[in-house]
Amino acid sequence: MSGITPFKLLMSREKALEIIMEHVKPVEAAELVPIERSANRVLAKDLVAGMDIPPFDRAAMDGYAVRAEDTYGTSEFNPKTLRLVGVLRAGESTSREIRNGECIRIATGCPIPPSADAVVMAEYTEEKGDNVLIYRAVHPLENISPRGEDVKRGEAIIREGEVLTPAKIGVFAALGLRKALVYRKPRVAVIPTGVEVQDLGLELKEGQVYDVNSYTLASLLLENGASVTRAPIIPDSYEALRSALYRYIDHDLIVFSGGSSVGERDMLSGIIEEDGKLLFHGVQIKPGKPTLFGVVREKPVLGMPGYPASCLSNAYVFLIPVIRKMARLPPKKPTTVKARMAKRIVSASGREQFFTVKIVDGKAYPAFKKSGDITSLSNADGYVILPVNLDVIDEGEEVTVTLFE
Amino acid sequence: MSGITPFKLLMSREKALEIIMEHVKPVEAAELVPIERSANRVLAKDLVAGMDIPPFDRAAMDGYAVRAEDTYGTSEFNPKTLRLVGVLRAGESTSREIRNGECIRIATGCPIPPSADAVVMAEYTEEKGDNVLIYRAVHPLENISPRGEDVKRGEAIIREGEVLTPAKIGVFAALGLRKALVYRKPRVAVIPTGVEVQDLGLELKEGQVYDVNSYTLASLLLENGASVTRAPIIPDSYEALRSALYRYIDHDLIVFSGGSSVGERDMLSGIIEEDGKLLFHGVQIKPGKPTLFGVVREKPVLGMPGYPASCLSNAYVFLIPVIRKMARLPPKKPTTVKARMAKRIVSASGREQFFTVKIVDGKAYPAFKKSGDITSLSNADGYVILPVNLDVIDEGEEVTVTLFE
């Protein structure tokens, strides 16, 4: 009897991602959030304008409200004089009608007085006591923003599914709305496993290492629109894994880190199969082979490798697309740059291989050390992929580097 | 006497930005934040490793700890038998020495037993009762991650000024650190002004509009690394402006929205000059002309246009670079795409002009309406710049669109 069992057939990265994506659903629930905190959230319901914006015909310029016909024929050399019958400072309005031959000084944004139909810009006027010289003709509606010009009452001005931006937040504000109805963030439970794993701030005992994965995963998830529960570290025993799975089953996604390696304590896949469906266990990428995915009580369960660099590198590959789909955010467009390999890299893994690299002066230097090494990623600017069917990239060859962002 | 004074000489956008950037300083103060919340924050002090990672020589693979010399000459067809003298499951360690002819089953991550110097991967072994058949030779140190291989004690592993990422957060975790010392976020006071401006949730009176700018600016600032105080709306009177300026002078940057137009109530530039220095008032861009900047008691003061689209468009031009410098974040690299103008656009402003556009099927449709119109921005994907010396872009001409992000 061997104490260690190998992986079954490995699945390609593309197929694994496709399976995960098929089995996760965008969040349906919605919540109200203060608009100034709603950037990058996804609108859950069409925003229908409850009022016109602007709410009244208003002056688009500082100047003089007039009857346009009074200005016809005027020019720089042939000004016309109108009688100043009032002044509207910002925030003021008047019900006084303007008759022919009259004008009212008006500040940008003020309601246009009744029967005025245009504004002459201050630059083309000269105020002299009770009179104003007009040096330029205006046509009706000139320098007026009519009521509803920006937004019409009843108009669906932002659509369900749109990602809110500062400008869209401005539309909520212009309508007087303090809160926006957005989709709730997907709730993710991150469960670190391993008897050898110690929580931060506590002393390491012989053979222990600190929990890295729940922190790297949490920060990556938070950046991509999730809310995160970091569970306490559990030993990777059958009882502990099973009880943690059901304790966090109310979450939208449950992520175990560790507990999915080929080690003899690997029980997670069995636990998933008891009451759910295991969809794959083992992916044809390096690092990141010991990744598993299943569904239990309609909740997606992802088992990530225990080694920090493998776990985080896999999170870029699988977790970001998944969480963004759940959060209804658009897929992240990876930024890529071209560089020349500063050193030859060789893969004999028979798997698609990710090599982290650091870019210096347009050259890509290998940054990858071992799957356990967090500095493989923390010192890297991005990664190069060596496909399954390619074993070597020579020094000086051009490669496409996908940047970590 | 005219009630309305024109702008003095307008400043170019480049020069205006240069002046602002010269007069703002990166924040010096630092604070401790929980590492899982520290993504995109800037490290305030070199992180020097207080321990080796891994903290001990450990197994890099599941397999059998051996003396390498015992495996020399073995092969698939010529296996060698070693005696199994122990088992190390995850989290376990042993002080038992391995003698020649012996091995210990070991899980990935366990400390290497004394006098073992290599691990044979499980795939190349067969366990039979107390014996293990070894099918492949290993050299000394094979499949061992030596103590300090990832990080060496005393090494400066992340440098002051680096922006924290999930991978760098992982380094903190690996060292057992719960918190990171990062630069404090720049504190920005956003002060909306105007007697005609009403706060959200309250009823509009005749001639009033809702406060848009403090919300759009707050969300843009929050996204770019600032912490924001949204001040109550103040009337743009001398007393109110002056008292608000000094009430928020303990902030790192004070932004007024409105209060910098040519309207007769424009007093902000005068207030700045009383006890500080006005550096410009009026920029040669459209929209966004009525922008001013000064320094009072060493604090930068920015006056933004009151019109929502002008204010936000100017925030993209001036406020983002400034706040990112103060927050010590790298400049935002604008994403640009090429598109063909779907319609002719004309500028006769004599100023550099920003046209917002919506991109549909590779064509850029003008989205800009008026400076007052928030939908000029909320319906747009990005903007096209028409330089001062260019008046027209024809339909079908290729343009570079800078995307809002």
Image (cartoon, coloured by chain):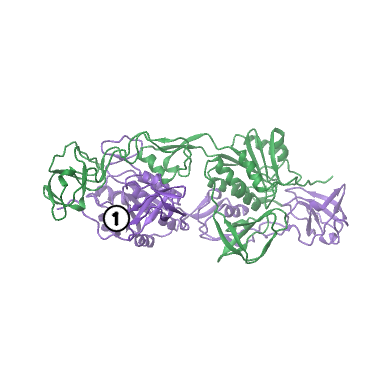
Chain colours: A green, B purple
Is B274 positioned to the left or the right of B54 in the image?
left
Can you see residue B250? Answer: no
The amino acid beneath tag 1 is Ala
Badge 1 crowding class, 10 Å Cα cut-off, few under 14, some 14 to 19, many 20 or more, is: few
Label 1 resides on the chain identified as B
Whether residue B12 is situated above or below residue A252 in the rendered picture: below
Point out residue B167 in the picture as x, y percentages from the top left corner. Answer: 59, 54
Q: Quadrant of the N terminus of chain A?
A: top right
Query: In percent of the image, x 73 and y 51: which residue is there?
Result: B108
Point out residue A249 in the picture as x, y percentages from the top left corner. Answer: 62, 35
Depth check: give the residue in front, A323 or B121: A323
Secondary structure of residue under mark 1: loop
Can you see residue B211? Answer: yes
Whether residue B298 is situated above or below residue A266 in the rendered picture: below
Point out residue B85 in the picture as x, y percentages from the top left corner. Answer: 84, 51
Q: Which residue is denoted by mark 1 in the rendering?
A: B348
Q: Total marks drawn?
A: 1
Query: In percent of the image, x 35 and y 46: which residue is there?
Result: B213
